[in-house]
């Protein structure tokens, strides 16, 4: 899948240049969605995984990550189901 566009939503493969936005969405999603199921300490530990540069470079280099954009702003991260390792449980 090279690129899919419908109205103002575009889905395409994420690239290393998108990493900063992807990590921001990752953190904000955990903070807003997981707050009901995890305590503050666990959320902090989980969200600080964005600081592991090697891990994120490996994810972007070795996995297929799609992004959804509205007006060129990333609004959703879509990991490949076959290789999904963005969410790592410790």
Image (cartoon, rainbow, N blue to C red):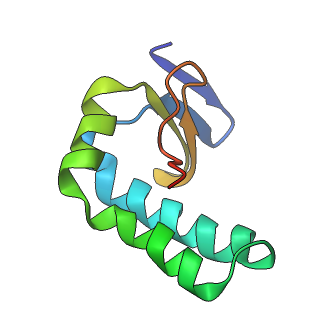
Position of residue 34 in the picture relative to residue 18 (left or right):
right
Position of residue 38 in the picture relative to residue 75 (left or right):
right
Residue 51 locus on image (x, y percent):
27, 66
Instruction: Name above or below for residue 63 compared with residue 55.
Output: above
Q: Quadrant of residue 57?
A: top left
Determine the residue positioned at 71% across, 69% down: 34
Instruction: Name above or below for residue 65 compared with residue 46.
Output: above
Instruction: Name above or below for residue 83 compared with residue 68.
Output: above
Position of residue 44 in the picture relative to residue 59 (left or right):
right
Determine the residue positioned at 61% across, 24% down: 81
Position of residue 50 in the picture relative to residue 37 (left or right):
left
Q: Quadrant of residue 59?
A: top left
Kindly give the residue lying farthest to the bottom in the view shown.
Answer: 40
Q: As rendered, which of 67 and 73 lies closer to the eye?
A: 67
Kindly give the residue lying farthest to the front in the view shown.
Answer: 90
Instruction: Name above or below for residue 24 compared with residue 74.
Output: below
Determine the residue positioned at 58% across, 37% down: 78
Kindly give the residue lying farthest to the top in the view shown.
Answer: 1
Residue 17 locus on image (x, y percent):
24, 46
Residue 27 locus on image (x, y percent):
50, 68
Residue 85 locus on image (x, y percent):
48, 37
Q: Give the number of callouts.
A: 0
Q: As rendered, which of 17 and 70 lies closer to the eye?
A: 17
Determine the residue positioned at 29% across, 47% down: 56
Kindly give the residue lying farthest to the right in the view shown.
Answer: 36
């Amino acid at each position: 899948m090279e690129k899919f566009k419908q109205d103002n939503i575009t889905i395409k493969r994420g690239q290393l240049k998108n990493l900063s936005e992807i990590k921001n969405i990752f953190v904000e999603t955990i903070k807003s969605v997981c707050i009901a199921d995890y305590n503050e300490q666990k959320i902090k530990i989980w969200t600080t995984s964005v600081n592991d540069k090697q891990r994120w470079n490996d994810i972007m280099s070795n996995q297929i990550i799609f992004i959804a954009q509205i007006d060129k702003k990333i609004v959703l991260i879509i990991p490949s189901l076959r290789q999904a390792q963005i969410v790592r449980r410790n």
